[in-house]
Image (cartoon, helix red, strand yellow):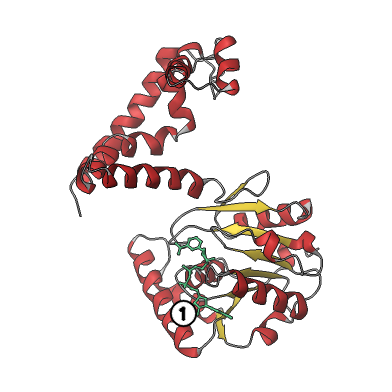
Amino acid sequence: MIEINDLDSVLIIGAGTMGHSIAQVYAQAGLEVDLVDTDQKKLDHALKLIKSNLDVLTEFNRVKMEEIPSIISRIHPKTNIKEAASDKLFVLEAVNEVVELKKKIFDQLSEFCPENAILASNTSSLDIFQITRSVKNRSRVIAHHWFSPPHIIPVVEVVPGRKTSQEVVDFSVNLIQKIGKKPIVIKKFIPSYIVNRIQNALYSAMYELLARKIATPEQIDLAIKSTLGIRLPIVGIAQSQDFTGLDLVLDIIKSKGGTLGLLQDKVDNNHLGAKTGKGLYDYHGKSEEEILKKRDRLYLRQLEFLEKLTSFKRI
Ligand SMILES: NC(=O)c1ccc[n+]([C@@H]2O[C@H](COP(=O)([O-])OP(=O)(O)OC[C@H]3O[C@@H](n4cnc5c(N)ncnc54)[C@H](O)[C@@H]3O)[C@@H](O)[C@H]2O)c1
């Protein structure tokens, strides 16, 4: 397995919505990037977008204007996957979400890349570990799931399959940190991983409300932006339950005829959330007043910020 500091070039396949911006992030971190797509027109467009992304980043002091030419010079657009893959020890695939296409790309990578090259996929919804069953040495296949736009959103979900080696997971974590992003490793493959799984639940509920004409899109967005929109950036969705109170959450589930062992155990142990100092989180002996004061100061700062942005008005 290659040492992270010896990796000086990577290969990104697919220069669309995700691939162009992921290539940019690698180039911003100082790595040489071969960016492969099917034709020169798509690559030219990708480079135009990269230049424009970088311009916006300079407005926010995230990139210096004088760095832009060298960042762009590190991105090498190519149409020949065989030539680009032959010396690459890390590849990220970001082609269209089509099983046969992903399979074809991974079969090519299996043939053209060195046998110890790590092969990552950005797929959001496919089981890449099923698709890559014919790849040589399956312990090197992993999902690196980025969020749009990759040059802005900090997190990359890292998803190992049953055969992925721990070395490949560790390498992935180090690489993603090295390029300035935050890896979140999930224990094992599950469709949609963390974020899309939760996001999909929100979308399903939203479409149900619309389809049953319970609320308009504007009402739904105003309701969400001015409630969850204030709380989520501070407490996420797990910790927010600690402020609701896990006893109440369990009572609600029971009133609908359900039950949840994990919550019943917490309630039986008096781990009810912020009010008892332990819930889904452990507050390490802090009093309820301390916890609530800290939360409320953060909520108020967030509210002030969102009001300044006029974010409760529609775009
Ligand atoms: N768009 C998103 O918000 C998002 C977010 C996270 C993950 N993803 C995942 O990223 C992947 C790419 O999504 P996208 O939105 O960037 O798609 P896209 O359609 O914008 O880009 C796909 C690119 O792949 C290229 N391509 C197709 N066949 C190719 C081949 N044989 N060789 C090289 N390039 C080829 C296409 O020409 C196109 O430029 C998908 O797996 C998707 O699930 C997308």
Circle 1 sits on which residue? 69
Can I make out residue 81 in this image?
yes
Hey, which quadrant is residue 114 in on the image? bottom right
Vertical arrangement, residue 216 with respect to residue 247, above or below: below
Q: Residue at x 75, y 65 (%)?
A: 133
Can I make out residue 3 in this image?
no
| Residue 162, image x, y percentages | 75, 51
| Residue 46, image x, y percentages | 45, 79
Q: Residue at x 52, y 68 (%)?
A: 28
Work out whether residue 300 or residue 61 is closer to the camera in this orientation and state it.
Answer: 300
Crowd tier of the residue under label 1, counting other residues whose Cα lies within 10 Å: few below 14, some 14–19, many 20 or above: few
| Residue 161, image x, y percentages | 71, 53
| Residue 134, image x, y percentages | 77, 69
Q: Residue at x 33, y 27 (%)?
A: 297
Q: What type is the residue that disc 1 sits on?
A: Pro
80 left or right of 197?
right
Hey, which quadrant is residue 275 in on the image? top left
Vertical arrangement, residue 105 with respect to residue 61, above or below: below
198 left or right of 297?
right
228 left or right of 220?
right
Q: Residue at x 29, y 42 (%)?
A: 209
Vertical arrangement, residue 122 with respect to residue 51, above or below: above
Vertical arrangement, residue 151 with respect to residue 209, above or below: below
Work out whether residue 59 or residue 288 is closer to the camera in this orientation and state it.
Answer: 288
Work out whether residue 67 or residue 178 is closer to the camera in this orientation and state it.
Answer: 178
Which quarter of the rendered picture does the N terminus lie within?
bottom right
Q: Secondary structure at mark 1?
A: helix
35 left or right of 198?
right
